[in-house]
Image (spheres, rainbow, N blue to C red):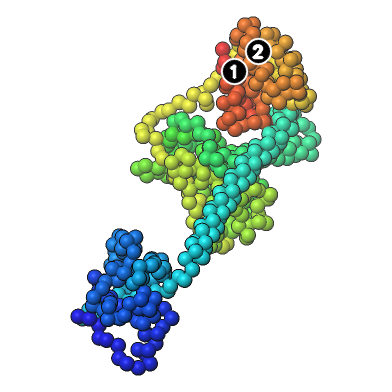
Amino acid sequence: MHPPPATNGPVDDAYEYAPCGLLRTEPDGIIVRVNATFCRWLGFKATDLLGRRRIQDLLTMGGRVFHQTHWAPLLQMQRSVAEVKLEFRHRDGHKVAMLINAVRRSSDEAAFDDFACIIVHDRHKYEKELVYARRRTEEALEAKIEAEEALRLANRHKDEFLATLAHELRNPLAPIQAALNFLSRKEFAEPDVRLSFGVLERQVAQIGRLVDDLLDVARIAEGKIELRIQRIDLIPMLNTAIEGSRELLRSKSDEFVADLPDRPIYIDADPARVVQIAQNLLNNAAKYTPPGGRIGLTVSWDDTHAIIAVSDTGIGISAENLPALFSIFSQLPSGKSYAQGGLGIGLSLVRALSEAHGGAATATSLGASRGSEFTVRLPLAPVQETAVKDERMMLAAAPGSRRRVLVVDDSEDAVFSLCMLLESDGFETRSASTGNGAISMASKADVVLLDIGLPDMDGYDVARQIRADPRNSGVLLVAVTGWSQNRDREAAAGAGFDHHLTKPVDYARLLEILNTAG
């Protein structure tokens, strides 16, 4: 049934002589109403169209295809079509371009489509505008690509800067750390000297942690967090973290309670990273808990995960700040007076390292000034064995057979402090400050501790030349450098190094290498 015809009067006149073409069709396209404007544009009379023609019959061949494949289905599904440009065929044969809007309407008795058409008088102008719009789109896309490339370049420069900064900081840290290790074996009678020595130890350790955190931020951004997975008992790792944070906990006069099970909990994880996770959580709790507060560490487990929880009675976290808590460089406004100069990246490292192990990190709080709890879940090892030996923990500390050590570094302080420390442990040391000096002296050493950045050649070339000399077939080569990215370790291995240590050197790890290598 067709819709009722319009009545005569002002409303009907407005329809007839509207500045746009108006028509109504049945769902199959049969025209049941059309205004004078549309008829004039195409050279038809209304009687030529009403009940005789379908709207698709007035289109060019391309328009009919579009109607069949796009227009009709869209009207069926979406009930409307907006801003479609199509060409109609004038009665005398020439083409008339129009912009069309259509909507499908339904009543209890019938369904029909209403069309509003606007003629495009200057086809060339329209096409020029279309070309211009396309050009602007292409330019915007090119600008977007350039901006993304600039961001990638800036990110790469940032990572390179962080790595360089860490390297430059590690160079002076190395001799300071070695000197402190040596002085730690001395007895100081004056209380002020003992107090000052303790301050130096703690602050050098803090600087080392900040340097490591800077590098970890770069690795996280690149998705290159390095994990050395092995089967470990979680409990000793947590005890190590507690010991590392004990001074900070004690300095805040907090009550610290650790509730650890008396049975092993085995996980497949990087032991150093697990210690880092737990220690960051403990340090964070200590920083943001006012003196006299309480900090707790508990460990539990379910069928699939070990669960580490650190709770505190500190400043708490408001609901709006919880979502951003684990973001890099994030610090709560209310906690800045407690931050003690931190970088605001500890919790982001906790989450990144937890997720890298296949786990998760979350935080909860009842609100500001009501404390908080941080929880880390790490997957359990498939089999909870009764005993798992950590070979690295069981390595003997007794002196091995490699007693002659050549220390190569262009920093006199670094050479002096490390040689002094090694000699106190019974090693015979010699030193060189250049690559050529190292090459000439390598055959008289069992171990060469070789810096990479030397004044006359880089350490990689030195290592290659040492390896090429048959007299040095038994020499152990250890890279000692401030560069610690994966690519630096790979470059060291490719040049012939047996080990790669970063400055400041972990002296216990160095002794482990010297005492266990045959």
Q: Is residue 136 visible?
A: yes
Which one is in front, 401 or 149? 149
Q: Earlier in the sequence, mark 2 or mark 1?
A: 2
Numbered disc 2: secondary structure: helix
Q: Position of residue 55 (x, y in %)?
A: 30, 71
Looking at the image, residue 359 sits to the left or right of residue 287; the answer is left
Q: Amino acid at mark 2?
A: Ile
Q: Residue furthest top?
A: 471
Location of mark 1 (residue): 496
Q: Residue drawn 59% across and 18% down?
A: 496
Quarter of the image holding residue 56?
A: bottom left
Q: Against 469, is 131 above or below?
A: below
Quarter holding residue 448 = top right
Identify the disc placed on residue 395: none
Q: CA distance from mark 2 to mark 1?
A: 9 Å
Q: Position of residue 332 (x, y in %)?
A: 60, 57
Are circles 2 and 1 on residues that touch, CB within 8 Å? yes
Q: Quadrant of residue 299?
A: top left
